Amino acid sequence: MFEAAELGRQLTKAQYEAALAKLRPALLEAHFALRDTKVPVIVIVSGADGAGKGEVVHRLNEWLDPRGVDTQAFWQTSDEERERPRYWRFWRSLPARGRIGILFGSWYSEPIIRRVYGELKTSQLDTEMDRVAFFEKMLVDDGAVIVKLWFHLSKQAQRHRLEELESNPKTHGRVLPSDWKHFKLYDKFTEVSERALRRTDSGHAPWHLIEAKDRRYRELTAGQILLQAIEARLRELKQLKPAPAAAKVAKPPARRGQAGVTILDHVNLAQRLTDKEYGTQLEKWQGRLTRLAWTAWEKQVASVAVFEGWDAAGKGSAIRRVTAAMDPRLYRIVPVAAPTDEERAQHYLWRFWRHLPRAGMATIFDRSWYGRVLVERVEGFAREDEWRRAFLEINDFEEQLAESGIVVSKFWIHLGKEEQLRRFREREEINFKRYKITAEDWRNREKWDAYKAAVNDMVAHTSTSFAPWTLVAGNDKKFARVQIVKTLCKHLEAVL
């Protein structure tokens, strides 16, 4: 693979300046046009040590309008980053729609280095690259343009480059001890990098190998590749016809012998607790949760609790019973409503990645990323292809949480349609509860069957061994609260 980037390509000063005179205005024009779109552009700058990657990053920032560029350098991980899933640092750095993000280093660096030094097996590297490929496909499906640049030097050229940098007083400090250490493993780095690139080279996010020996050639080539990628997407956008209005969600086909039956119909809503039983059991499980929350802090085990359910199902009161058992310093509640302008400018999972807890802490989501496959599906805010692929995207997200040691608990609080109606009317009649009932609640109730079908699909596709759903019988709030606190305790105990 890398032989194609060892052909001795170079440009004279005249050739470079002539090509640059055409490139720079075209690149700026494309960049300005990009701002009026919903397309984020992600530029990954990777490759051999000493290949001039940093110089290319500087040049791209010089050629583009700095007001529309975000540059992120990934090197050593901070304590804050180490306490969260590895991709957390990358999600935080993704550019918003209409902007260009230049990533100096990326999700490729760590797996390649760890494989070279024997910390990963080949099969583990392949698994990491499969996740990378899935991640990039997810971003592209959401509208992103990914430009992946790999700057290559032959072994001889890399040695010469490092020696040249080290001998120059102006650039001596740019050669790190790790650069020479990596150079001694040049052949291994080449082998592992080639495997990583082959496994992640795709039509939607192809790799571009750039011969990096000549400064003029590598910089001009990088700029031209970026320009071509942006212009290609701009042409696509011009050719696209306006999207048709969202179609009504069709009811799922009835199964023979059990038309309309969903997993929710098997939740026993008759389960109840007396006041005495409720008081005794709640005190017991809240006490246990108090101890477990502090043990999780001591052992640096984070947790995420997701609360979903019908309107008026009691999510808020259940969350209050959970937090009553925890020190306020140990948890954070994230109420999820309609996305803000900032959030709409990103992939829908971005706003949830940013709220993940540090080690030992807990984050409670009052509604969550499941809005993509529930309200956005039923109300037509997401196309069918968007909410269908969201099942895989969500499973991958939650698997990363679990792999990093985060305890994931997910609750759907179910209640009967008649019980919901009773609670709606009660809210209308009681002054201090009236704010809880809105016209949207009544409108959602009219789509009860569509939401039931969506919940059924959600549980079928996303209840996994690492992040199972707990279906809570919510007709009796006392029973539901105890079930939730008890389940959280069991999940924490299984890890602690």
Image: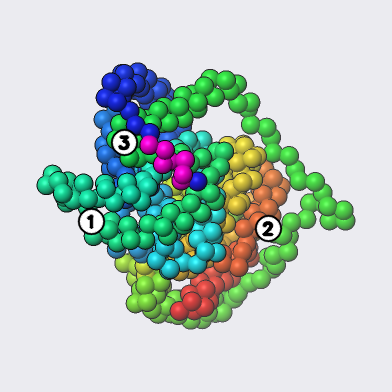
Q: Residues within 10 Å of mark 1 (few under 14, many from 20)?
A: few
Assign a secondary structure to mark 3.
Answer: loop
Assign a secondary structure to mark 2.
Answer: helix
User: What residue sits right under mark 2 in the picture?
Assistant: 460
Q: Give residue 282's position: percent from left, percent from top.
A: 50, 76
Q: Are marks 1 and 3 in contact (CB under 8 Å)?
A: no
Q: Is residue 1 above or below residue 329?
A: above
Determine if the magenta segment contains residue 92: no
Q: Going from the N terminus, do you reach mark 1 or mark 3 first? A: 1
The span shown in magenta is: 2-8
Nearer to me, 82 or 272? 82
User: What residue sits right under mark 3 in the picture?
Assistant: 214
Q: Report the residue that reaches farthest toward the right.
A: 257
**Res 348 visible:** no
Q: CA distance from mark 2 to mark 1?
A: 51 Å
Q: Is residue 205 above or below residue 327?
A: above
Residue at 44% from the left image edge and 76% from the top image edge: 289
